[in-house]
Amino acid sequence: MKRAPILEGTTKCISKRPRLDSSNNNELDEIFLKGSVIKLKLRNFMTFGYVEFCPGTRLNLILGPNGTGKSSFVCAMCIGLAGKPSLLGRGDKVSEFIKRGEDFAIVEVTLCTGGTQRPLVISRKISKNNLSEWNINGQNANVAAVLEETKKLNVQLDNLCQFLPQDRVVAFSQLKPQDLLLETEKAIGDAHLFNMHSSLVTKRQEIRGLATRVREHESELERMQQLNKALERDADRINEKNRLIAMEEDLRKKAAWLRFEEAREQCKASKNALKDCKKLVQEKQRQADIVIKPLETLKAVLKKTDAERRKIMSSMTSENIKKNSLDEQLLALGNDAEAVSNEVVSLGRSQAQRESKLLHLQSELDALTQQQLDLGPPPNNQEQMEEVKAEVRGHSSSMKELQGRRMELREAMTLPQRVQGEVANRLRQLDDVKNQRLRTLASMDARIMRAHEWVQANRQRFESDVFGPILAEVHIESQQNAKYLEQHCPFFLWSAFVTTCEPDLRLLRDNLGGPFGVTVINYQGDTSSPIRQPQNLEMLHKYHITCTLDMVFEAPSVVKYVLNDHAGTARSFIGSSNTDACMEELSEQPGVSCVWTPSSQYMMQSSRYSNQKSSRVVETKNCRLFTSSAPAAERASLEAKRREAEEDLLTISQQTKVLDDEIRTLEVLGAEARRKQEHLLAQRTAYEKQRSKIQSLLLSKQANLQSLRGQSDERETQRLHQKGLRVTQQRHKTLFQMHASLISAATFRQQLDSKVLRLAELELQVAHLKLQVKSFEDDFAQLQRQYTILEQVQKEETQQALQLKEQAMRIAHLPDADLEDKFDQLPSTVEEVQEQILDLRAQVQALFIQDPNALREYEDRKNKIQALEEALGTERETLDKGEGGIDEEKEQWLLELRDIVQRMNVSFGASFEDIGCVGEVSLQEHQDFDKYEMRIRVKFRAEEQLQTLSSQRQSGGERSVSTMLYLIALQEFTKCPFRVVDEINQGMDAVNERKVFVKMVEAACRPDTPQCFLLTPKLLPQLEYSPAVTILNIMNGPRIKEIADIRDRDFKFYKPIAGRS
């Protein structure tokens, strides 16, 4: 016996048994088989903060009290190896496996890959939004890659023969014999038997479908052949009619092409007339060109002469503009000479003004220099500035820290606020359910609603709890069970109120007895213990009885006791639709007085005198009162959550208020420090501003003074003399230019008169030629109009011919040699063709056809008959080949399967014989492969016969023994890497549990035995262990570390390894 090293976090895993002599351990193969679990690490998974499992190579016993986390190991293996949560029967979302209060969970599974190869490490990180992050050997991966790796190792988590979690143990015994055979085939070897079985089922279904189609096709072929014989006469007449119609169609085609030929000849005639007219137009154009050419030449000369005239006029205009400009220049120069004379006069007056300005600027400079001396040095407040800056930075740092803490408190406030909102919404929903029930009762008796309102308004007057109406206190999930419960209890119970003490009873009767008239029931019995159930309930399972009526609904314990006392809910049984067939036998069972099935209520009574039983059957009615339900336990839980959220909000609000006060204090201190800083800055700024202003004024005054001193009257006099000389010279030059401009203007006037006379002569010649051209244009226009008319006629006739050709092509496309031969044998004029068409139509009308669609139907059916005959030949050939192939595959499959079942039967029977019972495994063969069955038959008592294992016939312990021994018998044929069985020994008696354990130890010691995990909260004392057994103890509790330290001192063989939470 070995104990695996386990890394402990929030959970201690301690071996409770002393190590046996392991001197013979060398005989045990310590090598992990391919696919075995080497290590399992969990973080924040279900009950564990952090834990590490290191199982052994063979049988692993995982022990621990209920609730310590044994099944967490099973769940972790399933979730970590990409199994579906539904396989565990604990939920549908992976986020439900995250430890409460944590945001994520991590599962890491290390699997052996065989030989010296590197182990396979699969890691899965689960978040609260049901998303997962996968890693394989440290590399990012996805779920498809994980499934591919586990498939290579033959891990079958969906096979109950390999993976049997606690919540699915009962599912194994409920497997139908057909399903048990399939699960067994999956677990054997590489599942090739299961694949062969599935292939045979599929092929058998295909062969049967093919045989059915062959029979249907043969029948359909015979039917269609008979129908075609009846249509042959009508088909001949239709053929004759079609021949005449075809001849008519040929004539109609010939007529279309004859009309096109007539239109084409007419189009040719109009085209020739258009050509003649076009020749006349061209002749007139040639004559007009002879006159137009000299006219264009004269027009060009006229245009050139006119351009020369405009150029001369433009030159005259330019000379006039130049003369006007010279006049303006002479006037301006005269004004300039007068201005120079005035400046000479004013120069003498400006000398005195300049001396006065120099004296004034010097006095201003002296005053500014004195102000600069009076200003003094700048204020020395640098140390005060640094102290104030440090104070401001300190206040800012403290302010940021407090604001960060306030932000954290606000974020922490969102969680209780969200919880508060969710609880309020759910309470409103529950209140809506209760109000709906109350409205239903009020619709039947308005006094009930008034009584309920009075009770709610006077809650403070009661000494204890008051419930009611009872209908509003009951929660039931199944609508079918709701029908049973509503019909079973009388209406006065549903509208009744329940008290638990005499003063409350008197208070209600005094106030609700008169005007309200409702029922009040007082119950003062013990409600702490559960209602006693019938002792024969388990024996009634074989009649498909599932439970009693009081088990299908939730209510306060007082209400459940009242319903049981007044209506006997614990003595009313609920069955299924199969119960109807065995009611005669069920009615003879003791203690059975009322049975409910989906369709009926059976009530049995015994006569007081003769003890004879009589029964009455009532049809099950639909619900009128139970339209929805609201669980009381959920309401209490919601109220607790709301109070907790309110307390959290109050605490956070108080902390936030303290922080706000501190922040306001810091804001006041910070504002005062900033005001000091601004005052010091203002002093320095005012000094710098005053100093800069004085310096600027000094520079400005000095520059003005320097400028005035640089001015001189001698230079100004010289400047005015030069200016007067330049104005006189410019006036002489302008007078010479005026003389030349007047001579040019006279020359241009002579040239302009000559050009005007030449233009008049040319215009007379152009007018004479234009008259000749106008005569030619009139003749040409008349010919042009005639040509346009002829052209339009030719277009219309061409369009008509094209339309007729298009119509003829649609009716009969040419060239076509066959059609042209037919046209040669037909009349050559349209009139003769029309006459022959009328004759053919008369012959067609003379033919009487009973069914116009007979020919089409005959031909269609004839084609179908041909296609069907070909398909039948192919299907018959395929059917023959398929039957032969199935027989060969069946023989191969059955030969191997029978051998395995026979060997399993020997092993299973021997195991049962060892525990003093009888068991057998048999293969039930059938013509249909999907109806083959694997039957487990057991007998635990001598007086019994062998019975098929099922959840209705055997007890829980008997089913556990049978399941475990079946798995042991299956073990030598399976090549699965590991097997998991969770709490299968629960319900076994001590003798059977001991014997089963011995069998498991024996199986674990065999060569090439797969790794096995058995989870149980307890084991019998004095069991025999072998070196192949590894024990993992799991314990939880607030003092677990202290207990572990004590055990470390007492048991030196155990060495715990500390971990982290």
Image (tube, grey):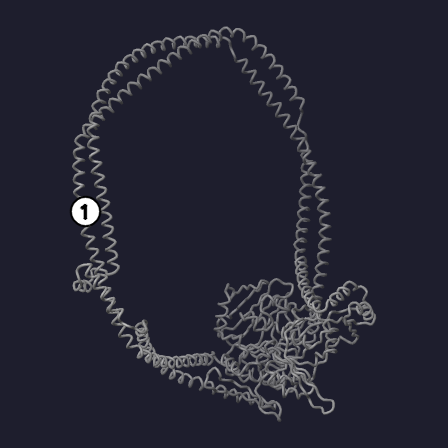
Residue 978 placement (x, y as % from top left): 54, 77
Q: Quadrant of residue 74?
A: bottom right
Residue 734 higher or lower than 99, as above or below = above
100 with respect to 208 (left or right): right
Q: Residue at x 24, y 18 (%)?
A: 755
Graded by Cα atoms within 10 Å as few (under 14), some (14 to 19) or many (20 or more), the crowding at tag 1 reads some
Residue 948 placement (x, y as % from top left): 57, 87
Q: How many marks?
A: 1
Give the residue number, with chain letter if any, for mark 1.
271
- Does the image show residue 1030? no
- Does the image show residue 614? yes
Residue type pointed to by label 1: Lys
Q: Quadrant of residue 65?
A: bottom right
Residue 649 higher or lower than 965, as above or below = above
Residue farthest to the bottom, as pictured: 943
Q: Quadrant of the N terminus?
A: bottom right
